[in-house]
Image (spheres, rainbow, N blue to C red):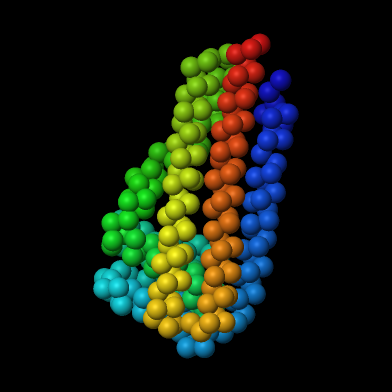
Amino acid sequence: MFWPFWDPTMIIVIPALLLALYAQLRVQSTYGRWSQVPIANGLSGAQVAQEILRRNGLSEVEIERTDGVLSDHYDPRTRTLSLSSDVHDGVSVASAGVAAHETGHAIQHARDYAPLALRSAMVPTAQFGSWLAWPLFAIGFFIHSGVMIQLGILIFSATVAFTIVTLPVEFDASARAMRALQEERLVTADEFRGVRSVLTAAALTYVAAAAMAVLQLIRLLMIANTRREE
């Protein structure tokens, strides 16, 4: 039997839930730790980003302060790098790492990095699918409509694909960030270890999101199969 909030197939997603919880706790712990460690060169996150962009010939990319905590992102449509206040103004190892990561996305954009272009193109479909798929699937289940069930699964698959495509984009941005910080000597060896810890912890959240999406898709397929057998 299918329940709106609980059914036996939800056991499938428990590992992903635990991974997501661990990833979130690790991000908070790691970021909190290294945000208390001042960076030796005294540069703020915004200044670190500006320096990396300048050295990569991307001075036209705008850097702005945005609200929220760890709400940092790069918008390829406007070529704008938005940094949360703590990162933008922070003079810490964590701020440098996060700011450098976002410049990694700007560099990807400038270098026509294919996975970034693909992810950007998938954003509207993924957003649409994330809120439509589950209601469509549930309605189809309760009114015994195989077409609606399959349509819900198909739409949700777009969200799953988006989380998977996100992985190489984020991993590559972090790799570019760490390489830039090292090559341009913006961090010391000890600070680099902190940056790597922060970015590795952040990457784990994307792995958890992808795992959750894949397991949820498997769960939907199992529920749909159960319905066909009834």
Name the residue furthest bottom.
41
Quick check: 22 above or below 162?
below
Out of 113 and 130, give the one closest to the viewer.
113
Image position of 56 (left or right of 179): left
Total number of numbered discs in the rendering: 0
The answer to whether residue 49 is left or right of residue 160 is left
- The answer to whether residue 65 is seen in the rendering is no
Residue 203 lies, in percent from the top left, at 54, 58
x, y (%) of residue 43? 45, 84
Residue at 46% over, 28% down: 154
Image position, residue 134 (x, y; %): 55, 31
Q: Nearer the viewer, residue 25 or 168?
A: 168
In the image, residue 162 sits, relative to residue 177, either above or below, namely: above
Quadrant assignment for the N terminus: top right
Q: Is residue 130 visible?
A: yes
Depth check: 88 or 20 in front?
A: 20
| Outermost residue, top side | 230
In the depicted structure, whether residue 91 falls above or below residue 224: below
Q: In this rendering, would 79 be left or right of 125?
A: left
- At x 66% / y 39%, what residue is drawn? 13
**Quarter-of-image position of residue 107:** bottom left
Q: Residue at x 51, y 84 (%)?
A: 188
Name the quarter where the C terminus is drawn.
top right
**Residue visible at 35% across and 47% down in the picture:** 118
